[in-house]
Image: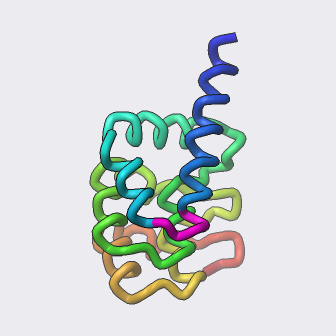
């Protein structure tokens, strides 16, 4: 069915992006994500809409690895909704970054773009 092929496409895109994020290949990630902003937005929305991902976003994934500010900023501009998404533990990208020892600059960027995240507690009450 059509929705299955869409999910397959999203899965492929996501796993490709997650591999780059885990490898911290920021240059390639930036090239892929930002060379085609429309696809990035569409895929980000599909990932958010897909229950299988439990609210995780590419921003959550990046936030774990103290990404370059410029890349993070671009990702936020393309898909600001990701800042508000809670993953399966109720964590926003800010929670994830803070829990992974991200730099003060990363924390600040996430906070400035979505100050309300400071008031949201995850399941651990953080």
Left or right: 115, with 1 as reference point: left
User: Looking at the rendering, in which quadrant would you find the C terminus?
Assistant: bottom right
Q: Where 61 falls versus 9 (above or below)?
A: below
**x and y, in percent, of residue 14 in the image:** 59, 45
Q: Residue at the spot x=55%, y=59% of the render?
A: 20
Q: Residue at the spot x=52%, y=82% of the render?
A: 98
Q: Quadrant of residue 84?
A: bottom left
Q: Quadrant of residue 88?
A: bottom right
What range of the chain is rendered magenta?
Answer: 21-25
Q: Quadrant of residue 39?
A: top left
User: Looking at the rendering, in which quadrant would you find the N terminus?
Assistant: top right
Left or right: 10, with 37 as reference point: right
Q: Residue at the spot x=67%, y=49% of the render?
A: 54
Looking at the image, which is closer to me, 3 or 9?
9
**x and y, in percent, of residue 32 in the image:** 40, 48
Q: Residue at the spot x=65%, y=78% of the render?
A: 125
Question: Which residue lies most toward the top here?
Answer: 1
């Amino acid at each position: 069915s059509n929705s299955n092929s869409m999910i397959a496409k999203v899965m492929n895109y996501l796993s490709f992006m997650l591999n780059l994020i885990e490898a911290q290949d920021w240059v390639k990630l930036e090239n892929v994500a930002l060379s085609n902003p429309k696809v990035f937005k569409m895929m980000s929305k599909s990932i958010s809409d897909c229950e299988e991902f439990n609210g995780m976003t590419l921003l959550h994934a990046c936030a774990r690895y103290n990404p370059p500010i410029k890349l993070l900023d671009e990702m936020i501009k393309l898909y600001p909704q990701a800042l508000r998404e809670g993953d399966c533990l109720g964590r926003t990208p800010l929670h994830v970054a803070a829990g992974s020892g991200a730099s003060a600059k990363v924390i600040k960027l996430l906070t400035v773009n979505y100050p309300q995240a400071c008031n949201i507690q995850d399941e651990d009450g953080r």
